[in-house]
Image: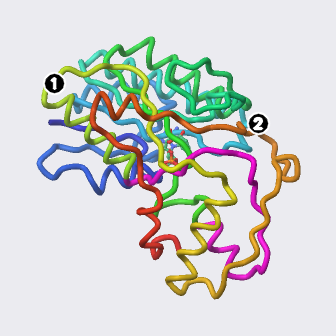
């Protein structure tokens, strides 16, 4: 099995590198080693390594900055995956690609299913949706894993921010009217590696889009409380601050976020036996975030 991991220095990328089975031949490349916006380089590197599976963990993920950097967001989130998909198809590799809950408008009163109509509310979501379309068009042997609210030991994320703030504030205002689910980056990596193994084993794979995020659903304010409670218990934060849930309107950001970004993850469990990420379990050891 030859696995190529693209975007290997990101939150998910690093977990993929750590967790890839030792018996596989793995080529992991970060942005310095392969810039996915350089289509000629992508084609060259993929053809030279000739992988069975490519996992694309590279992305432009700055949701607010994307509003003023649309060209760059599209270059990385649409044109990059398009180049990877073309290169994968040319050498017979399958492409596992990560997408986002932000492809949805957020006005559905129930969790989103894979075939629900999309309708991103900002440039980041729109560029990720364009990436999904590019992958689907260029490489039939693809899986697009839509995930949400990613946190892990590596890089910047909400969990680390909340612990940092709680260390020196008595009160925190956190958005309480956006609902979704946190997803542990290590679990995303394991889900992708499980899918890669299925491909490598030559088993029948139902290609297409799958939702994979955490359970149970929550809102940002309750997620913050769960994080900080763990940090207090472990002694990293002196005491639980007063966590005040505020509305999205009270916390204006350049990009509008979906009010509901809960993903219905039953399809991936039925097809591959991959259960939702247990984000509460992933927080039990809070040390990596503190
Ligand atoms: N983070 C979330 O909450 C979230 C939610 C839903 C879905 N997702 C999706 O999950 C996936 C993984 O996200 P993540 O949180 O692991 O993101 P991340 O930590 O921001 O990692 C993304 C990686 O991609 C690299 N990259 C950026 N431009 C590149 C380019 N042109 N060529 C090659 N690499 C490039 C980045 O390198 P530099 O750091 O050097 O720029 C970074 O290492 C992405 O597809 C993202 O859209 C994330």
Q: Residues within 10 Å of mark 2 (few under 14, many from 20)?
A: some
User: Is label 1 in a helix, a strand or a loop?
Assistant: loop
At horizontal 51% and vertical 31% (from top left) the residue drawn is 37
Residue lying at the far front of the rendered structure: 109
Q: How far apart are labels 1 and 2 at the CA level?
A: 41 Å
Image: magenta residue range: 160-186
Residue 68, quarter of picture? top right
Q: Which mark is drawn over residue 203? A: 1
204 relative to 183, above or below: above
User: Is label 2 in a helix, a strand or a loop?
Assistant: helix
At horizontal 44% and vertical 16% (from top left) the residue drawn is 136
Q: Residues within 10 Å of mark 1 (few under 14, many from 20)?
A: few
Question: Which residue was labeled with disc 2?
Answer: 67
Q: Is residue 208 left or right of residue 100?
A: left
Residue 140, quarter of picture? top left
Choose the circle earlier in sequence order: 1 or 2. Answer: 2
Q: Nearer the viewer, residue 120 or 3?
A: 120
Looking at the picture, how far across and down is residue 24, in whole percent? 15, 44
Q: Which mark is drawn over residue 83? A: none
Q: Is residue 278 left or right of residue 203?
A: right
Give the quadrant of the N terminus.
top left
Looking at the picture, how far across and down is residue 202, in whole percent? 14, 24
Q: Is mark 1 within 8 Å of ligand 1?
A: no
Looking at the picture, how far across and down is residue 88, in whole percent? 32, 22
Please identify, in this view, whether the residue under mark 1 or under mark 2 is nearer the observer: 1
């Amino acid at each position: 099995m030859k696995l190529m991991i693209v975007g290997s220095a990101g939150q998910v990328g690093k977990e993929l590198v750590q967790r890839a089975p030792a018996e596989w031949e793995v080529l992991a490349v970060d942005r310095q080693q392969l810039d996915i916006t350089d289509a000629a380089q992508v084609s060259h590197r993929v053809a030279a390594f000739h992988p069975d599976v490519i996992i694309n963990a590279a992305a432009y993920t700055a949701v607010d900055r994307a509003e003023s950097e649309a060209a760059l967001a599209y270059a990385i989130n649409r044109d990059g995956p398009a180049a990877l998909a073309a290169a994968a198809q040319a050498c017979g590799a399958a492409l596992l690609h990560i997408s986002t809950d932000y492809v949805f408008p957020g006005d559905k009163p129930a969790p989103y299913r894979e075939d629900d109509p999309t309708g991103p509310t900002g440039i980041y979501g729109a560029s990720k949706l364009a990436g999904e379309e590019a992958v689907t068009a260029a490489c039939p042997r693809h899986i697009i894993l839509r995930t949400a609210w990613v946190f892990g030991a590596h890089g910047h994320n909400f969990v680390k921010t909340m612990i940092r703030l709680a260390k020196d504030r008595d009160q925190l205002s956190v958005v309480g009217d956006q609902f979704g689910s946190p997803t542990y980056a290590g679990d995303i990596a394991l889900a992708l590696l499980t899918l890669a193994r299925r491909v490598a084993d030559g088993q029948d794979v139902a290609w297409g889009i799958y939702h994979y995020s955490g359970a149970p659903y929550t809102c940002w304010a309750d997620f913050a409380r769960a994080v900080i409670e763990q940090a207090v218990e472990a002694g990293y934060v002196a005491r639980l601050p007063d966590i005040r849930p505020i509305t999205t309107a009270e916390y204006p950001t350049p990009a509008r976020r979906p009010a509901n970004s809960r993903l219905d993850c039953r399809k991936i469990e039925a097809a591959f036996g991959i259960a939702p990420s247990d984000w509460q379990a992933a927080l039990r050891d809070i040390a990596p975030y503190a």
